[in-house]
Image (cartoon, grey):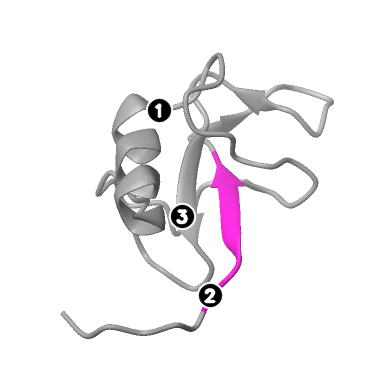
Amino acid sequence: MTTSTTVRPLLATAQHRAPWTDRPWGVLHAAVEGAAETLCGQPSLTWPKFWRLTFRPGARDTCGACSAALRRHAG
Ligand SMILES: [Zn+2]
Protein backbone atom coordinates (compact mmCIF):
# COMPACT_ATOMS: atom_id res chain seq x y z
CA MET A 1 0.00 0.00 0.00
CA THR A 2 1.16 3.47 -0.84
CA THR A 3 0.09 6.58 0.93
CA SER A 4 -1.47 9.18 -1.30
CA THR A 5 -3.22 12.43 -0.68
CA THR A 6 -5.00 12.20 -4.00
CA VAL A 7 -8.72 11.99 -3.51
CA ARG A 8 -10.50 10.17 -6.28
CA PRO A 9 -14.25 10.57 -6.70
CA LEU A 10 -16.30 8.04 -4.86
CA LEU A 11 -19.21 6.52 -6.71
CA ALA A 12 -22.44 5.22 -5.32
CA THR A 13 -23.25 1.95 -7.05
CA ALA A 14 -25.65 -0.96 -6.66
CA GLN A 15 -26.11 -4.32 -8.26
CA HIS A 16 -29.41 -3.29 -9.83
CA ARG A 17 -31.24 -0.17 -10.87
CA ALA A 18 -34.88 0.11 -9.90
CA PRO A 19 -37.02 -0.14 -13.05
CA TRP A 20 -37.80 3.19 -14.78
CA THR A 21 -35.87 5.20 -12.24
CA ASP A 22 -32.41 6.52 -11.56
CA ARG A 23 -32.49 4.95 -8.13
CA PRO A 24 -30.62 1.92 -6.85
CA TRP A 25 -32.47 -1.29 -6.18
CA GLY A 26 -31.31 -2.81 -2.94
CA VAL A 27 -28.13 -2.11 -1.04
CA LEU A 28 -26.01 0.86 -2.08
CA HIS A 29 -22.27 0.30 -2.24
CA ALA A 30 -19.34 2.66 -2.66
CA ALA A 31 -16.57 2.34 -5.24
CA VAL A 32 -13.64 4.50 -6.20
CA GLU A 33 -13.98 5.80 -9.74
CA GLY A 34 -12.24 3.48 -12.17
CA ALA A 35 -11.98 0.62 -9.70
CA ALA A 36 -13.23 -2.81 -10.67
CA GLU A 37 -14.56 -3.56 -7.24
CA THR A 38 -16.61 -1.91 -4.55
CA LEU A 39 -14.94 -0.96 -1.30
CA CYS A 40 -16.28 -4.21 0.15
CA GLY A 41 -14.67 -6.22 -2.65
CA GLN A 42 -17.56 -7.05 -4.95
CA PRO A 43 -17.00 -6.89 -8.71
CA SER A 44 -18.91 -3.79 -9.71
CA LEU A 45 -17.67 -3.02 -13.22
CA THR A 46 -21.02 -3.82 -14.79
CA TRP A 47 -23.16 -2.37 -12.02
CA PRO A 48 -25.15 0.81 -12.64
CA LYS A 49 -23.51 3.90 -11.21
CA PHE A 50 -25.53 6.58 -9.49
CA TRP A 51 -23.64 9.78 -10.12
CA ARG A 52 -26.28 11.93 -8.53
CA LEU A 53 -26.28 10.03 -5.26
CA THR A 54 -23.81 10.51 -2.45
CA PHE A 55 -22.71 7.45 -0.54
CA ARG A 56 -23.24 8.26 3.11
CA PRO A 57 -21.63 5.74 5.45
CA GLY A 58 -24.10 4.18 7.81
CA ALA A 59 -27.17 5.58 6.07
CA ARG A 60 -30.20 3.39 5.47
CA ASP A 61 -29.78 0.80 2.71
CA THR A 62 -26.05 1.28 2.45
CA CYS A 63 -23.52 -1.52 2.65
CA GLY A 64 -22.06 -1.90 6.14
CA ALA A 65 -18.73 -3.19 4.82
CA CYS A 66 -18.40 -0.26 2.40
CA SER A 67 -19.27 2.15 5.21
CA ALA A 68 -16.61 0.62 7.43
CA ALA A 69 -14.04 0.74 4.63
CA LEU A 70 -14.83 4.37 3.96
CA ARG A 71 -14.41 5.25 7.62
CA ARG A 72 -11.03 3.52 7.58
CA HIS A 73 -10.08 5.51 4.48
CA ALA A 74 -11.08 8.74 6.15
CA GLY A 75 -9.00 7.85 9.14
ZN1 LIG B 1 -20.34 -2.78 -0.20
In reply to whether residue 72 is colored magenta, the answer given is no
Q: Which amino acid does label 2 sit on?
A: Val
For disc 1, the marked residue is: 63
Inter-mark Cα distance, 2 to 1: 21 Å
Residue 49 lies, with reference to residue 68, above or below; the image says below
Question: Which circle, 2 or 1, is nearer the viewer?
Answer: 2
Looking at the image, tell me whether mark 2 or mark 1 is earlier in sequence order. 2
Measuring 36% from the left and 85% from the top, which residue is drawn there?
Answer: 4
In reply to whether residue 11 is colored magenta, the answer given is yes
Q: What residue type is labelled 3?
A: Ala
Residue 62 point in image, percent of width and height? 49, 25
Q: Does the residue labelled 3 lie within 8 Å of ligand 1?
A: no
Quarter containing the C terminus:
bottom left
Q: Residue 74 carries which label?
A: none
Measuring 40% from the left and 28% from the top, which residue is drawn there?
Answer: 63
Q: Which amino acid does label 1 sit on?
A: Cys
Inter-mark Cα distance, 1 to 3: 11 Å
For disc 3, the marked residue is: 31
The residue segment tinted magenta is 7-13
Looking at the image, residue 30 sits to the left or right of residue 42; the answer is right
Quarter containing the N terminus:
bottom left
Q: How many marks?
A: 3
Residue furthest out toward the left:
1
Measuring 80% from the left and 34% from the top, which residue is drawn there?
Answer: 22
Looking at the image, residue 72 sits to the left or right of residue 34; the answer is left
Helix, strand or loop for disc 2: loop
Mark 2 vs 1: CB contact within 8 A? no
For disc 2, the marked residue is: 7
Looking at the image, tell me whether mark 1 or mark 3 is earlier in sequence order. 3
Residue 19 point in image, percent of width and height? 75, 22
Mark 3 residue crowding within 10 angstroms, few (<14) / some (14–19) / many (20+): many
Helix, strand or loop for disc 1: loop
